[in-house]
Image (cartoon, helix red, strand yellow):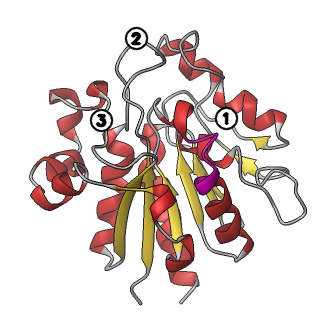
Amino acid sequence: MSKKVLFVVTSTARMGEGGPPTGLWLEELAVPYYMLRDAGHQLDVVSIAGGTVPIDPRSVGPEHDRLPENRRYRDDPALMATMQSTRSVSAIRFADYHAVFLPGGHGTMWDLPGNEALASGISAMFASGKPVAAVCHGPAGLIGARLPDGRPLVAGRWIPAFTAEEEDDVEMKDKVPFVLDEKLGSLGARLLKGAPFQPMAVAHGHLITGQNPASAREVGGLMLAALQRDD
């Protein structure tokens, strides 16, 4: 049975005022997007502010074209057009969707955590038992989400996310507003840490998270399985 899945991506194009360029990490959208689309699901992409989605320049180019999904995105005029004119997350109804997916990219660290429409939408979907997935820096969008009793949504949940060690390795630890795995841990998440830049993903109930770009395929597969269980 076809399900409606919402992808919510960053609108942040720079790491702070005058900082280096950032945005969405393309692999983290393209890989799960095409997995879910090929399985027959209906997909919408929205961004925090609406309009054009910035794509991190470090996530495109010859090195990243080894991924068939990145090449497919480049040859997909419909999806590329969508990415030029997204609706804002505040303009949609989360209740219209069966699941939500938060791709990463460093841009998410600036505009996902404080967005009230995103926080309330994810909280409502999770409380309804709908799958909520996030990969790499995408779990930044879980920071503001709450359980019905007011506790952080991530409290007590096993969660992998981009680690302090990985931020060090890409020389971004001093550029981001906070270290994501440490922040999630401070909210009560039970952190899972795999080897740097190797796949690590887990489903704890209907919360699905992955550590880094290499985990996008695993998170997509767990999302597919969750949607099939909901049939």
Asked which quadrant contains residue 146, the reply is bottom right
Residue depicted at 83% across the width and 33% down the height: 186
Position above or below: 51 against 91: above
**Is 171 situated above or below 201?**
above
Q: Which residue is mark 1?
A: 193
**Disc assigned to residue 40:** none
Q: Which mark is residue 18?
A: 2
For the point 52% across and 64% down, the residue is 100
- Mark 2, other Cα within 10 Å: few <14 / some 14–19 / many ≥20: few
Where does the image place residue 103, in percent across and percent down from the top left? 45, 47
Separation of disc 2 and disc 1 at Cα?
32 Å
Q: Earlier in the sequence, mark 1 or mark 3?
A: 3
Residue at the (43%, 81%) spot, across then down: 3
Would residue 16 appear left or right of 74 to someone viewing this image?
A: right
Observer-side mark, 2 or 1, equals: 2
Query: Observer-nearest residue: 190 or 42?
Result: 42
At horizontal 20% and vertical 38% (from top left) the residue drawn is 66
Discs 3, 2 touching: Cβ within 8 Å: no
Q: Is residue 187 left or right of residue 223?
A: right
Q: Is residue 53 magenta?
A: no
Image-quadrant location for residue 176: top right
Magenta segment: 112-118
Secondary structure beneath dot 3 equals loop
Q: Nearer the viewer, mark 3 or mark 2?
A: 2
Q: Which residue is disc 3 drawn over?
A: 55
The amino acid at mark 1 is Lys
Q: Amino acid type of disc 3?
A: Ile
